[in-house]
Amino acid sequence: MHNISNIDLNLLKLFSVLYQTGSVSDTADVLNISQSACSHALTRLRQKLNNDLFIRIENKMEPTLFSENLAAKILPAMEILQLGLTPIEQFNPNADTTYVIAVTDYTAWCMQPLLEHIQRYHPNISIRLVSLEQRIPEEKLKSGKIDLACGFAHQAEPSQSISGVTWFADNYVTVMSTQHPLADQKSISLDDFIAYQHVLIAPWNEGRGVVDKALVKHRTIRKIALTTPYVLNAPYMLNNTSWLLTLPQHYARFVKKQLALKIHQPPVAVPNYNLKFYIHKTRLQDPKIMWFKNTLNTVFEHITEE
């Protein structure tokens, strides 16, 4: 038995070509080496395998029985290696393709311009939205069960395995019913803010949110009347209550008129948020992912990566 670790793979490539051409000169041309180098390489392979491999008969290199048996194994293996080294085909947006994207209710809502663009210009692409069950589902991104995760963050998130593409940034506002005692005030104080009960949006069942963390700096806490994982339905809970709700300004402005809400700036410094598409770094060169990022940049113009 011959140990492959002791054999230069270039010699096996030479064997493969010589078996198919039956000519040292033709093999040298295919491999772009001199005939002398080709002959010396064949000699080394013969010594390694302890077999003549090819016998010159009527100016053609005829394989020995050993070579015939070897070729049956080596040639298919060389084809597989060549196939593995072939560049990945470019992504075809006109072919039937499905993107699986994990989202929250709010991040899916914000994706509407992107979905409209894809539907209009690339109708063969299907988008499957699934629930974002954890903030960054690293294992599912790695395994390919999902292509991307659409979530949000309040600060930079350096990671060895996950790349974040920021495509939308916004700030938070505090809203209340127009019937709320604070509705007509031009601004609300910190004392007013903590005097009333609040709705907490917690997509992953967190016990506190970004507002609570901001309040810690003021050594105070707020009273939570309702906790919900959903941004989109949270404003609907304010009707006929004295509750306060701090949520993304982008959505607050959208529902303000239809729900008769008043919008105020929160009395504490709440960090802005960035909507992000999370991608596993092993897929950054995947043409399917690269096309999505390019399309994202087309729709939202200024995306950034980390």
Image (cartoon, rainbow, N blue to C red):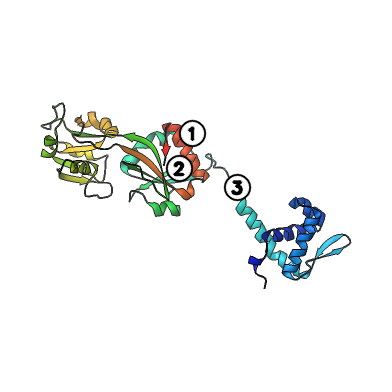
The tag earlier along the polypeptide, 3 or 2, is 3
**Residue that mark 1 sits on:** 121
Seen from the viewer's position, the closer of residues 251 and 196 is 196
Relative vertical location of residue 98 with respect to residue 3 in this rendering, above or below: above
Callout 3 amino acid: Pro
Distance in Å between CA atoms under marks 1 and 2: 12 Å
Residue 154 image offset from top left, x and y in percent: 31, 41
Q: For numbered disc 2, what is the local secondary structure?
A: strand
Task: For label 1, count other residues whose C-alpha is less than 10 Å away and answer few (under 14), some (14-19) or many (20+).
Answer: few
The tag earlier along the polypeptide, 1 or 2, is 1
What is the quadrant of residue 174 in the picture? top left
Seen from the viewer's position, the closer of residues 265 and 181 is 265
Q: Nearest to the eye among marks 3 and 2: give it.
A: 3
Which quarter of the rendered picture does the N terminus lie within? bottom right
Q: For numbered disc 3, what is the local secondary structure?
A: loop
Callout 2 amino acid: Ser
Q: Is residue 34 visible?
A: yes
Q: Nearest to the eye among marks 3 and 1: give it.
A: 3
Task: For label 2, count other residues whose C-alpha is less than 10 Å away and answer few (under 14), some (14-19) or many (20+).
Answer: some
**Residue that mark 3 sits on:** 87
Write the residue at 71% across / 60% down: 11
Distance in Å between CA atoms under marks 3 and 1: 27 Å
Q: Are marks 3 and 1 in contact (CB under 8 Å)?
A: no
- The circle on residue 177 is none
Report the residue that reaches farthest toward the right.
58
**Residue that mark 2 sits on:** 126
Q: For numbered disc 1, what is the local secondary structure?
A: helix
Distance in Å between CA atoms under marks 3 and 2: 25 Å
Write the residue at 13% across / 39% down: 194
Callout 1 amino acid: Tyr
The tag earlier along the polypeptide, 3 or 1, is 3
